[in-house]
Amino acid sequence: MTWLVAVKAMTQDPNTMIETKPMQKMESTKGLPTKNTDNPMSASMLALPAEIMFKTFQDPSLVGNDLANLRLVCKWVNSCATEAFAKERFKKGLRLDFYAQEFERLAAIYSSSLGPFLESVHFVRNYDLLSIKAYARAHPDYSALKDINFESPLSNPGSPSALTELLVQAKHLETFSFSTANKPKDNHSLAGFYCDDDRTRKVRDREQVDAIFSKLKSDRLAELNLVDVIFLVRTLKALLERHCGTIRKLSFRACGLRCGSYAGLLLWISQNLSCLEEIELQDIYETAWGAFTPVVTELVTKVGKKSIEAYIASLQKQAKS
């Protein structure tokens, strides 16, 4: 029986996934290595050279339940096995639905030893996530989080506030992608975006967007992507001003500007974002009191400071003419 087969034989509990379970009782015998007395296989495991144990954790044939249970075999190997399991489980990030319960699951992960290895989270509506244990009193540390991709309406009460709490603690976030998934189908529905029968919800959504923007405070935010978002220009400026020394890429698609002009916003951006290297714009409109004015329809992509400055200068000339 090969070592990998032996490892898999030890790790056949299908119920262990992401949750951290308590270690089994450990005993120490004088003259002998510490071992898990409930699992005789762990004693032979401790006798293996470190090189073999390292290769075991890195072996691509060990995935899912094997790695999840390997980290529970013995406390001596828990750290290495946890890292191997987390890297395999979170190599494509984690997808969550936009509900308060999902934030509890996320808090459980970041309150456990798995937290430092989860760097990317994608919030998307109606995604079926495997159930994991939610701690009643979690104290998550979101400092490892580098990428948040939010793609969901803001209709679930309580969830927007949970997102703002997450952003406050994500001090080292590098990429924030934000889409409210409210893109109108045509100009008529676009005009109705402010004036339809559900005006109360629209106003609430805009207030939530402003609140979310105000909580984003990272020391290394390099990329901001907004899709189907209506925002107050001064709120966006405040967000960008907090990250003026780190922002390198901006992308606005199907976005509405409130209380401000497109040309004025871009002029401010060129004067205040010293590190900006790339900007993408498409389907941008200005809106006020139920009216809207399309200002960009085709995709505009500018890379490099000179290209960005030349584009903004051309907008200023058009505004004066």
Image (cartoon, rainbow, N blue to C red):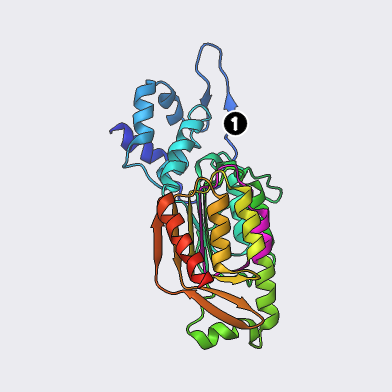
Q: Is 239 drawn above or below residue 50 in the view shown?
A: below
**Side (left or right) of 161 relative to 77:** right
The residue drawn where x is 55% and y is 59% is: 267
Q: Residue 274: image x %, image y %?
A: 53, 46
19 vs 286, nearest the viewer: 286
Q: Amino acid at mark 1?
A: Lys
Residue 118 falls within the magenta-colored stretch: no
262 vs 147, nearest the viewer: 262
**Residue 207 picture quarter:** bottom right
Q: Residue 7: image x %, image y %?
A: 37, 36
The residue drawn where x is 46% and y is 55% is: 309
Q: Residue furthest top?
A: 31
Asked whether residue 84 is in view, the answer is: yes
Q: Residue furthest left?
A: 1
- Disc 1 crowd rating (10 Å Cα; few below 14, some 14-19, many 20+) is few
**Side (left or right) of 102 relative to 318:** right
Identify the residue under disc 1. Answer: 25
Q: Is 180 drawn above or below residue 121 in the view shown?
A: below
Q: Residue 297: image x %, image y %?
A: 43, 74
The residue drawn where x is 58% and y is 57% is: 268
**Residue 205 picture quarter:** bottom right
129 vs 279, nearest the viewer: 279
Q: Residue 204: image x %, image y %?
A: 69, 73
Rendered-image quadrant of the N terminus: top left
Q: Is 256 drawn above or below residue 217 in the view shown?
A: below
Label 1 element class: loop
- Which residues make up the magenta segment? 209-232
Label tally: 1
